[in-house]
Amino acid sequence: MQASQKAFAQNQFGFDFTFIQTMFRRFSRIPSQRRLAGLFGLTAATGIYHLSNNPRTIHADSDNINDPEKIEIGTIKVAYPIQKDMGLLEKLRDTASTYVAPTLTGLGVLRVDALSLPCDGLSHSYIDGRIGEDHNADASVVVNAIYTGYDDPMTADFLLRNLANFILHFVSSIPSRLPSSELDHQEVGAENIAVVAAEEVIPVGTTGAFKIVDQLLVANLAEHVLEEMAGGHIEKDQASALLTCGYGRSSALVSIFDCKTRMLHVALAGRGRAVVGRRSGKSSYQVTQLTTDQDESSLPIRVLGGGGLKWPLKMQERLHADFLGDPPQEPSKDVTPEPVISDFQAAPGDFLILGSNAFWDCLSNEEAVGLVGIWAEKRDSGLPRDLFPVATSPNDIWKPDQLPVTIKDRKDNTPWNTPKRFINTEKNVAYHLIRNALGGEDEVMTRALLFMSPFRKQKFKGDIAVSVIFFQ
């Protein structure tokens, strides 16, 4: 990053990496058994307008083990440690976040529900929600996001703390809006944000935010570490901890709702999916997938972080030799932080489902929309009943073909080869979705998946994060 760009980032946003150093110092003082974050770690990682700014984690420590199950083999008694039933489903329900407030409803958003369920006890997925003012357009912008770290949670944590702030700042800083017929499209620069067409303000500002945050996360971070070490301001262990953010990789799935035009913009770099449900007729929903699934086999590879794929070879060699960095490799020209952005005109009664990749491994687009539909009709959700069709099922147990949607690619079994049977018993729709993604009516299967050791869980599911936004 050029010095002028670096100065811009620091002067405009006050970004100086001190929060990472603070995190490291705090982390180093935590007893090692607590750093593991428990065996189960059910987490509701919430954003600025959800219930908390900090992830809440449920810990399962060594005192959660029952007396060993003893089995006699001949004259020898063999003891097997058995985990207690800690009421995991109840604790997971308690961590689900719901936000309904006049400040949102006045902006065209009725309600936001969110929940994140980590796979290995340490959350790699974070859910964010923020409201910002676009003073140039005299309008408000509502941002919701899911960040999922691929190899280390600190990169996703970095995005949680910074990306939405940069998006809101870039969007509100674009100085003027002109009709596209009067203006040639220009790209956002770090030092001088160009004038762009009115309808492109959010897409262009969002793309610029993704790029500058990735520069801070990769190029600027490495420069900072080298400067701090040269000046004797940090030790080798701190430098290594700081570089974790840069080496790690994370996806970012971000929705930006323009409250004035009711245009919904969804940006995706990496894994995740955004799906909209809309009432179609009296008793069904239309399903629209807004994002195209991305993986590392498609080019370019879109990811934030991943310094090992982006730093110059000489920089990697220096970090590897002096700071416990990864083995050097040739940087790839096929890696970019630039997101793919799609637009959708939201209507009253629409709802948006943001989900991590692991969530969509369990449910299809149609199943997820149908489940939200039956939930909205039944629950006392604060949503106007006339916006949602009435659907019924005997005994409140639903098969996929009983949901108020047309199932295109019908799969009657779960990824664990058990029949899909859905229930509708929860007040929070994000928990309702995750509960049905992990077994539905088959509570024994749900508990088995939650109760599994972190190492075995990774073979069955990844981090599941869901956010559902209802539009007024």
Image: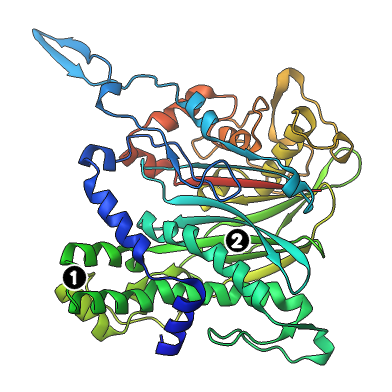
In the shown orientation, is residue 116 left or right of residue 378? left
Q: Residue at x 53, y 29 (%)?
A: 94
Q: How many marks?
A: 2
Query: Is residue 445 something one can see in this rendering?
Result: no
Mark 2: few/some/many CA within 10 Å (<14, 14-19, 20+): many
Please name the residue shown 56% across and 53% down the image.
128
Residue 75 coordinates in the image, percent (x, y)? 8, 7
Label ID, residue 323 = 1
What's the distance in space between the residues labelled 1 and 2, CA to CA?
33 Å
- The quarter of the rendered structure image containing the N terminus is bottom left
Residue sitting at 19 percent across and 78 percent down?
231
Q: Quadrant of residue 249?
A: bottom left
Would residue 186 be visible to someone looking at this image?
Answer: yes
Residue in the foreground of this view, choosing between 211 and 437: 211
Q: Percent from the top left, x then y, of residue 154?
A: 37, 57
Residue type (three-letter) at the residue carrying disc 1: Phe
Amino acid type of the residue tagged 2 in the rendering: Val
Q: Secondary structure at mark 2?
A: strand
Vertical comparison of 156 with 428: above or below: below
Which percent across, then down, holds residue 164?
Answer: 57, 63
The residue positioned 40% from the left and 21% from the top of the image is: 86
Across and down, in percent, residue 194 comes to: 65, 87
State the mark number for residue 254.
Answer: 2
Choose between 148 and 292: the one closer to the eye: 148
Q: Residue 372's image quarter?
A: top right
In-front residue for pair 141/147: 141
Residue 260: mark in rendering: none
